[in-house]
Amino acid sequence: MRRKKIDLILSSFGVVLTVFFVVAGSLLLVGANFARSTVTDQLASQNIAFDADASKLPADLASWAGTPVTDGPSAKAYSDMIAEHVLAATGGKSYSEVSGQWFADGKPGPSADQNNPNSYDIRMTAFMGNSLRGLLLNAYAFWTIGTIALIAAWVVFALALVSLVFTVLGFRHASHADEIPPARAPELQNA
């Protein structure tokens, strides 16, 4: 096969590869934007924000004071704060443990005195807190997936650029390639 023909075949494959990378990168970018904008829209509509007074927040979350929860990292941080509050309210027990205590106490209803919560109140606090944490962590997970897709999109676009450069160089080389004559079998000499 002649060199020019090989260059044209490889360069044509380069065109297909470049188009594939551009399409794949575009789809990853659309997915990233969808995930991140959906998380932002859903969280923003809930009007969740950290207390503006940093002294009311756990020490490791003080830097979030006054910040609205509108993205994955802020949702994760708010979830961490809820976890601390739930642990404080339950005395460090899990939902399963406080629920078991509620059953053991004969499944009482809510306490009439809010300053003296019973096992029902503690169970409900654990349930609601863990549910909110799960929802916020779900938002954080989708935000993270969107971020990974965004990084992947830029990597794939870079691959498309590299592929395009090599494709152009291949077509350029093909246009200047000298025709190489086919190889000839050595002539056999009879002695």
Image (tube, rainbow, N blue to C red):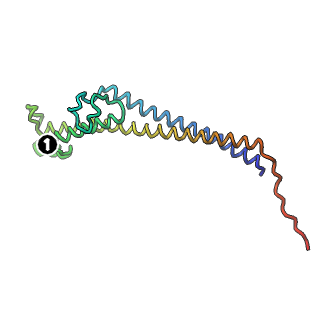
Residue at x 11%, y 36% (from the top left corner): 117
Q: Quadrant of the C terminus?
A: bottom right
Direction from residue 34 to residue 109 in the image, left or right: left
Place of residue 36 in the rendered image (x, y in percent of width and height, measured from the top left): 41, 33
Direction from residue 85 to residue 143 in the image, left or right: right
Place of residue 180 in the rendered image (x, y in percent of width and height, measured from the top left): 81, 51
Residue at x 42%, y 39% (from the top left corner): 145
Residue 21 quadrant: top right
The residue beneath circle 1 is: 102
Direction from residue 168 to residue 186 in the image, left or right: right
Residue at x 23%, y 29% (from the top left corner): 53
Say above or below: 75 vs 97.
Answer: above
Name the kind of residue labelled 1 in the image.
Answer: Trp
Q: Secondary structure at mark 1?
A: helix
Residue at the outermost right position:
191
Q: Nearer the viewer, residue 124 or 69?
A: 69
Place of residue 89 in the rendered image (x, y in percent of width and height, measured from the top left): 16, 39
